[in-house]
Image (cartoon, grey):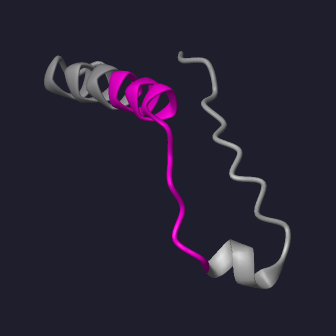
Amino acid sequence: MAEPTIVLTHAQTPEAILAPKVIGPADLGRAAELGQALAEGLSLGIW
């Protein structure tokens, strides 16, 4: 199990929702760690 990762972009209008987003390094790092854990679990046959 992993804690949920939520990234808030505060896009509230249709234009803002469709616009390109810039995700900060802290959020990208957390997503990378979660991806690495998932990949390791897959390689070990845990998932």
* Position in image of residue 27 (x %, y %): 51, 32
Out of 3 and 7, give the one closest to the viewer: 7
Residue 19 drawn at (x, y percent): 59, 76
**Hey, which quadrant is residue 14 in on the image?**
bottom right
Looking at the image, is 44 positioned above or below residue 10? above
Q: Quadrant of the C terminus?
A: top left
Q: Which residues make up the magenta segment? A: 19-34
**Image position of 29 (left or right of 36):** right
Which residue does the image show at 63% across and 80% down from the upper left? 18
Indicate the position of residue 35 as horizontal and vertical percent values.
33, 31
* Residue that appears at 53% across and 16% down: 1
Say which of 41 and 33 sits in front. 33
Q: Is 29 on the left or on the right of 8, as rendered?
A: left
Q: Toward which corner of the image does residue 45 lie, by quadrant?
A: top left
Number of numbered callouts drawn: 0
- Residue at 69% x, 52% y is 9
Residue projecting furthest to the left: 43
State left or right for residue 28 relative to residue 18.
left
Q: Main secondary structure of the magenta part?
A: helix
Q: Is residue 32 magenta?
A: yes
Residue in front for this viewpoint, 37 or 16: 16
Q: Residue at x 66, y 36 (%)?
A: 6
Q: Residue furthest right?
A: 12
Q: Residue 33 in the image: x percent, y percent?
A: 35, 21
24 versus 16 height, above or below: above
Residue 15 lies in the magenta-colored region:
no
Residue 8 image-quadrant placement: top right
